[in-house]
Image (cartoon, grey):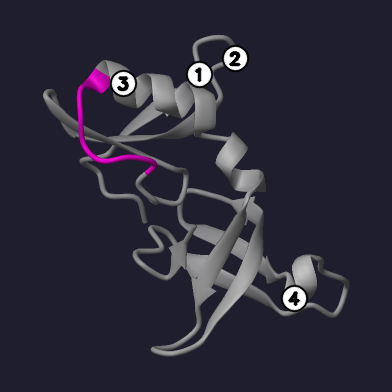
Amino acid sequence: MIPSTWRPYRRGSDDELVGYLDGDDPSVTPRTLFGYPLASAGPAAAAVRLLEKRGLVCLAERWSLRLDSTEQVDVMIMAAFPDWIEVVETEYGSYGPDSPRHRLSVPTGDRLTR
């Protein structure tokens, strides 16, 4: 579950949740819907700009999922919610109906990276 200290950030134009602000000025970290830091901590205004620009866009990007201490697989995000995220393995850059799927608790910690 998302820590209660992370402040939800909603896009002003449509009130869509695009991520979270972790910390207080002058040290705020912009985080995705599943807790991945989009940048290092910095001014709140910069964190907000980054969430506006990349908060939801990053959901369509390719990610790497650590399955265990040695194995990593490429994945795409299928669904993201405040308490869980579903990813699908994308062997050779694509996925199909039989591609392995993984449901992860949010925040994902260091298991899901770019």
For numbered disc 4, what is the local secondary structure?
helix
39 falls in the magenta region: yes
User: What residue sits right under mark 4 in the picture?
Assistant: 91
Could you tell me the amino acid type at mark 2? Asp
Which comes before the other along the chain, label 2 or label 4?
Answer: 2
55 falls in the magenta region: no
Q: Is residue 80 left or right of residue 41?
A: right
Q: CA distance from mark 4 to mark 3?
A: 35 Å
Tell me whether circle 2 and circle 4 mark residues in contact (CB < 8 Å). Answer: no
**Which residue is located at x 45 percent, y 51 percent?**
34
Residue 41 vertical placement versus 91 (above, below)? above
User: What residue sits right under mark 2 in the picture?
Assistant: 14
Crowding around mark 3 (Cα neighbors within 10 Å: few <14, some 14 to 19, many 20+) is some
**Which residue is located at x 54 percent, y 67 percent?**
64
Q: Quadrant of residue 91?
A: bottom right
Q: Which residues are magenta?
A: 38-44
Could you tell me the amino acid type at mark 3? Ala
For numbered disc 1, what is the local secondary structure?
loop
